[in-house]
Image (cartoon, rainbow, N blue to C red):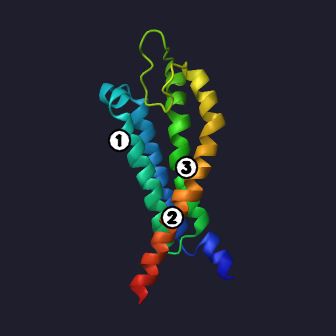
Amino acid sequence: MVSRALLLGTGRSPKRALGAVAAAFVAASLLVALPWEPIRTTGRYPIWAALVAVGLAGAGYAGRHRGGLVAGWGASFLATVWIFVVPPLAALVRGDTLGDGGYAVPRPSIVALRPRAELLTGLRIGPIVALLVALTLGSAAFALGAGLRRRSVR
């Protein structure tokens, strides 16, 4: 029973941790989908950093409030996979091309790929990188939250 509670959590905490990441996911997606120039060029790194920070904060919240390790991993995974999938998908939907300089959405690739090629590359490597981030940083954030919970109980 203890291991099940550790993995899946208790109460509403898993839903709250994943809900916060989902809200940040939607907000960041809207920022990328809008054709606003500062977001498309210089705003990409703050968006990424904020999204990953929200994912790690969700993992820490899950640890602090008995939300479960799976919720912590899921929060970190979703925040990281967004970076690889959503920006090229938004560019592909908008019809941006590489040649006319219109493809300026935030994207992880530093090489000049067309939106479709970058989306396919992101779908291949994004989940692997996101899994590594979730298992390392997500676990660390969860453990930090659980440690803070134990310290406050004393």
118 shown above or below 53: above
Q: Is residue 27 visible?
A: yes
Q: Are marks 3 and 1 in contact (CB under 8 Å)?
A: no
Does residue 81 appear to the left or right of 151 in the view shown?
Answer: right
Q: Find residue 20 and report its horizontal and vertical position in percent.
A: 45, 57
Pointer 3: residues within 10 angstroms few (<14), some, or many (20+)?
many
Looking at the rendered structure, the secondary structure element under dot 2 is: helix
Q: Identify the mark at residue 140; answer none if there is no mark.
A: 2
Q: Earlier in the sequence, mark 3 or mark 1?
A: 1
Q: Earlier in the sequence, mark 2 or mark 1?
A: 1
Q: Nearer the viewer, residue 94 or 144?
A: 144
Q: Earlier in the sequence, mark 3 or mark 2?
A: 3
Q: Which residue is mark 1?
A: 46
Q: Find residue 47 and report its horizontal and vertical position in percent.
A: 38, 41
Query: What count of labels does the image hold?
Result: 3
Q: Residue furthest top?
A: 100
Q: Identify the mark at residue 16; answer none if there is no mark.
A: none
The residue that appears at 59% across and 33% down in the rendered structure is 122
Q: Which residue is mark 3?
A: 78
Q: Are marks 2 and 1 in contact (CB under 8 Å)?
A: no
Distance between mark 2 and mark 1 Cα atoms:
22 Å
Looking at the rendered structure, the secondary structure element under dot 1 is: helix
